[in-house]
Image (spheres, rainbow, N blue to C red):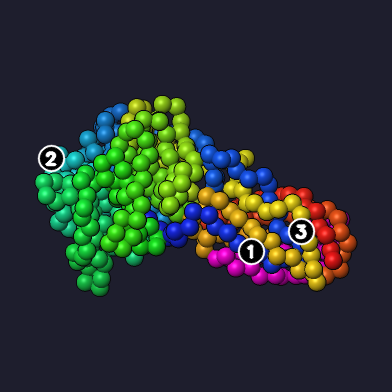
């Protein structure tokens, strides 16, 4: 159920050809079961109760805002609670006692949305304290894309669909509906205009009007989903007690877990942190990227240089947003000169080409900046100069 959903390109593997004086290096590739960054528990907050910072038995929705705030649909306590990225309580938005808030989403304009299934509407809480709502019978999941369009899933009687409310100069107007769903729940948008919706035991990815991919994460029904900074899908997996990460094409990329995690929802912060509501401990668990296991690129261990230039195929697994990847490579070692390459959106620019040099071993250092998160990698490469 998350908050803002951003960009995405539908590539499970980002591949680049770099033009450089010698080569771009990388550490050894990731394991077969973990592509992209690994995650570790960084903290948790909350407990069962009705006070500020406490949660009822069910907290069905999580979202994050562009400033890093975490929004929790505290369903049984009829409210949305707001926290800092590390769990400091900041405020709350109240619903009527007869209403159980089902999901929450953060709008790019800074306002907050929540769904109230009993009254069949999605409600917006503006920064000034004003509220507005859109009618959506059986409203369950909600998502807001980068343009401010609102997606609401409905699950009541014959209304089993997702409705998009389009943002315009005059506000929101009801737009396209997406049907063919049996048990719709959480919904998430992606930067390329596609979106995901939990439907029973599966998660469906819509591209245009059609279902482009169906995901099944485990024996239990996925409850919450999120799209991360690398444009991959996270889903809760209660049967395996973890969060599971998939590429847009359906390849399993890795997991994140802590203890006997019973996650009802997952959200991704603007710096890549993961948040999950653990129904077992009634707390929000925060995961951060494990910098000891950085995002890893793959390049061969030998480079042949002709006329001062070598073209090297460079791949980065676990990233479905190649336009979000930038890299800088520098060369130091027994081969004369230095080289630097900048990579953006799959293209390379040679900044300097030391054409003179002898064959030998060079140490390459790469600083990869994947969606704003830098990692440094080094690798020794055998360089042959023609």
At horizontal 21% and vertical 44% (from top left) the residue drawn is: 183
Element marked by disc 1: strand
Q: Quadrant of the C terminus?
A: bottom right
Residue that carries the numbered disc 1 in the rendered image: 17
Q: In front here: 61 or 10?
A: 10
Instruction: Please say whether residue 350 is one of the residues in the magenta stretch.
Output: yes
Residue 322 in picture, x, y percent from top left: 52, 60
**Nearest-to-viewer mark from 1 and 2:** 1
Residue that carries the numbered disc 3 in the rendered image: 303
At horizontal 42% and vertical 34% (from top left) the residue drawn is: 242
Q: Residues within 10 Å of mark 1 (few under 14, many from 20)?
A: some
Q: Is residue 249 left or right of residue 140?
A: right
What range is drawn magenta here? 331-354
Residue that carries the numbered disc 2 in the rendered image: 98
C-alpha separation, residue under disc 1 versus residue under disc 3 = 13 Å
Residue 185 in picture, x, y percent from top left: 25, 45
The answer to whether any part of residue 315 appears in the image is yes
Element marked by disc 2: loop
């Amino acid at each position: 159920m998350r908050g803002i959903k951003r960009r995405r390109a539908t590539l499970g593997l980002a591949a680049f050809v770099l033009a450089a004086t010698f080569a771009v290096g990388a550490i050894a590739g990731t394991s077969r079961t973990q592509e992209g960054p690994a995650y570790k528990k960084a903290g948790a907050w909350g407990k069962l109760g009705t006070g500020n910072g406490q949660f009822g038995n069910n907290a069905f929705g999580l979202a994050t805002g562009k400033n890093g705030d975490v929004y929790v649909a505290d369903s049984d306590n009829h409210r949305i609670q707001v926290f800092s990225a590390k769990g400091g309580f900041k405020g709350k938005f109240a619903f009527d006692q007869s209403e159980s808030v089902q999901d929450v989403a953060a709008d790019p304009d800074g306002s907050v949305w929540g769904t109230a299934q009993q009254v069949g509407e999605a409600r917006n809480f503006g920064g000034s304290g004003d509220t507005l709502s859109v009618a959506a019978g059986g409203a369950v999941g909600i998502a807001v894309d980068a343009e401010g369009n609102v997606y609401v899933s409905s699950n009541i009687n014959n209304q089993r669909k997702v409705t998009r409310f389009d943002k315009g100069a005059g506000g929101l107007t009801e737009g396209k509906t997406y049907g063919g769903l049996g048990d719709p729940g959480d919904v998430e948008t992606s930067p390329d205009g596609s979106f995901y919706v939990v439907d029973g035991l599966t998660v469906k990815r819509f591209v245009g009007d059609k279902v482009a991919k169906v995901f099944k994460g485990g024996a239990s029904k996925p409850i919450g989903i999120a799209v991360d900074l690398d444009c991959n899908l996270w889903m809760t997996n209660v049967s395996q007690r973890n969060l599971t990460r998939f590429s847009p094409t359906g390849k399993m990329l890795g997991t994140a877990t802590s203890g006997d995690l019973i996650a009802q929802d997952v959200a991704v912060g603007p710096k890549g942190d993961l948040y999950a509501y653990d129904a077992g401990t009634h707390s929000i668990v925060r995961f951060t990227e494990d910098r000891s296991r950085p995002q890893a690129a793959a390049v061969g261990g030998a480079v042949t240089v002709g006329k001062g230039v070598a073209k090297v195929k460079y791949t980065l697994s676990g990233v479905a947003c190649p336009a979000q990847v930038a890299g800088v490579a520098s060369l130091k070692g027994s081969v004369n000169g230095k080289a630097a390459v900048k990579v953006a959106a799959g293209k390379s620019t040679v900044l300097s080409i030391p054409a003179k040099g002898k064959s030998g071993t060079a140490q390459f250092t790469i600083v990869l900046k994947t969606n704003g998160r830098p990692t440094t990698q080094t690798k020794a490469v055998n360089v042959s100069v023609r």
